[in-house]
Amino acid sequence: MILRILNYPSPTTRQCSNRTLVKSATIAASCSSDAAAKTASSIVAHQHHHDRQFSSLPHHLARQNNGMVNVLVKSTKVPRPSLPKINRLKKPLKQEEVTLQHVPSHMSYAGSQRMPITSEMRIVKPGEDTPSGIWPVFRMMDESGNFRKPDFSRHTNVSKIIPPKHHDLLQLQSALTIQYPHFKHHFMSSRLFQPSKNPYPDMPLKKEEEDDAKNTLLRAHRQMIRLRQMDEILHNAQRQGRISFYMTHHGEEAIHMGSASALSPQDVIFAQYREAGLLMWRGFTLDQFCNQCFSNDYDLGKGRQMPIHYGCRALNYQTVSSPLGTQITQAVGAAYKFKLDAMNNKEKEAAISIVYFGEGAASTIDFHSACNFAATLGTPMIFFCRNNGYAISTPAEDQYAGDGIISRAPGYGMAGIRVDGNDVFAVHAAVAEARKLALETSAPVMIEAMTYRQGHHSTSDDSSRYRDVDEVQAAQDVTDPLIRMDKFLSHYGWMDNNAVTSIGDEERAAVLRAMEAAEARPTPTLESMFTDVYHEKPPHLIRQEKELRQHLVKHNIHHH
């Protein structure tokens, strides 16, 4: 159903707070339902109350065309798409603590640009009208830990619904679906609300907590804590001179767990360098992380890479490369191979490639080349931009004059969406939908996740020299994704401060054990330096190995 709002210029228009308000408007509905009439009346009343013009409606809902605005309104008579059957509750839900909650309409993580927030997920496809002005940010859960009401609901009564069974994932899914029906599709299709058939190997398995070991949502929460504990300990290890380099992920954990949980195991990940959580989600252990950072004989890279340059063929995670942007073009090639495989073998399991990069890497020629090739070749992949506000020491406002990175997608003929990178549920929903679209259309999709880098760029950086410490503190206090997740779980009685602290202590002890074990192991053998590049060692490598050994003997340097 479409409400058509005629918004013709009028000579009797008056100015209010630098906004133009049309005195009168005519509303014509394409159907005669009472719901349409009520909706039209509420829109007009809402506009006059706030002294707003119709063009200030969220850009994904309104489009200007020859003085006419089309506003899409969901009709109750339109049949909804079929979804999996809801696990209905046998007992009525208990509602507690009904409060009046403010729903923010805009957000800003870094810089001064304020972006409109939307509760409607819409991937803008090639050929469709793009949002006028600033692209909206898709968000499901606010900083309060409460899910959002539909757009136009600036204030809402929030009822805390308590599922009857503690830590029952399906019951929580049902409760959320009843409380927030506009997110029903996302809740029912989200893998975060689907328990595993078998216990997760990396979840502590206690007899009284056997069901928790299969709980995907609790695993995502625990791994966010695990990643943060690992960052803190290995960052301190570098400061102590025990490893040579490190990069933290503080403030970006929701991107990792939200996107990783929406992908399939056969999807190939091309990371930049701040995506260790994706590898953690796929099963990379703390021992393996520490072995790589300490470059010991158990390191899968055999000590040839800097710390945090992880890679694992078994988990379809390509090895991180230091030069900025090189992984973007490589991901296009992998996606093109998947396309050819799908054409030649219809029964083969469909897969995409997904490449992660920061907004700074979007200024490289690799980014442009990759986007152009991906769009023209029609490769099934996702370009995932982590816009955390800073390219090392360069703030976003000094990197580009346009509306972030997502506004470039239409220029390449690419679908795109902007999402709140600190909302694990919104990230998951966006990646799941983007993956589905990429496979259906055999075309790339761009996602820009707005977030904030709380830590230094790396251990070689001091961010206090180019940004205010109060800015960082505000991000830690207000927009932190882990705090948001803690609040959500506490609203439903799944978590409290003591439980969060206990999990943090457990993970901290596990990281320390892994680090001490990795540090105690020997370095890779000398022979491993000359292997793996060629099937048979060529003459020039044989000569180099001989010269190295002679050099070690000459200077009395011992190496096993």
Image: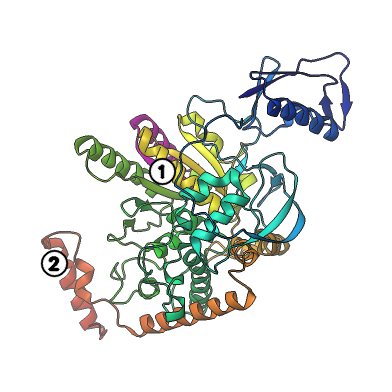
| Distance (Cα) linking label 1 and label 2 | 46 Å
Residue drawn 37% across the image and 62% down it: 282
Amino acid type of the residue that numbered disc 2 sits on in the rendered structure: Ile
Residue drawn 59% across the image and 59% down it: 453
Any part of residue 392 in sight: no
In the image shown, does 34 or 201 lie closer to the viewer? 34
Please say if 396 is above or below 2.
Answer: below
Label located before the other in sequence (1 or 2): 1
| Image-based side of 537 in relation to 326, left or right | left
Residue drawn 39% across the image and 32% down it: 375
Q: Which mark is residue 542?
A: 2
Any part of residue 416 in sight: yes
| Image-based side of 277 in relation to 420, left or right | left
Q: Which residues are magenta?
A: 364-387
Bin the neighbour count of mark 1 within 10 Å (Cα to Cα): few under 14, some 14-19, many 20 and up.
many
**Residue 375 painted magenta:** yes
Bin the neighbour count of mark 2 within 10 Å (Cα to Cα): few under 14, some 14-19, many 20 and up.
few
